[in-house]
Amino acid sequence: MKRLVIILAGVVAGIAAYTGWDMYRAHSLVADVCARAVPGHPVEAIVASVSKADFKVVAGQDRTIIVARSGFGRYHCAILHDGTRIRSAAVASMD
């Protein structure tokens, strides 16, 4: 019984460590994208520069959301634009 508890505690610790690493990675990826989204630059340049394997892009008329596929989609970069040029960009989370 004691052995089962130790194994179970190890599994739970492993899952918690992986989840924490995945969240950290997602936040880092999104922060990097937002740092490159400089006001005045074309929106399409940022959208074209992100990896389709790491991000999902949701484009709108005046807003583009770039969501990290890792981190359970919690972190994203919200880019406000006028249709062609970036006005602002900020890291946000789905809390």
Image (cartoon, rainbow, N blue to C red):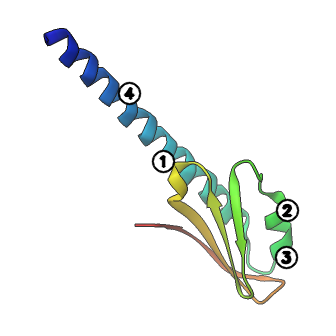
Residue nearest the observer in this picture, 61 or 31? 61
Q: Nearer the viewer, residue 62 or 5?
A: 5
Q: CA distance from mark 3 to mark 4?
A: 42 Å
Image point (75%, 87%), residue name: 61
What residue is shown with label 4?
A: 14
Of badges 1 and 3, the one in the foreground is 1
Residue 65 position within the rendered picture, expressed as x and y whole percent measured from the top left: 65, 72
Q: Do tag 3 and tag 2 residues touch (Cβ < 8 Å)?
A: no
SS at badge 2: helix
Sooner in the amino-acid sequence: mark 3 or mark 4: 4
According to the picture, the residue beneath numbered tag 3 turns out to be: 42
Which comes sooner in the sequence, label 2 or label 4? 4
Residue 65's place in the image compared with 12, above or below, is below
The residue identified by callout 1 is 23
Local crowd size for mark 3, using a 10 Å CA cut-off: few (<14), some (14–19), many (≥20): some
Residue 56 position in % (x across, y down): 69, 60
Q: Earlier in the sequence, mark 1 or mark 3?
A: 1
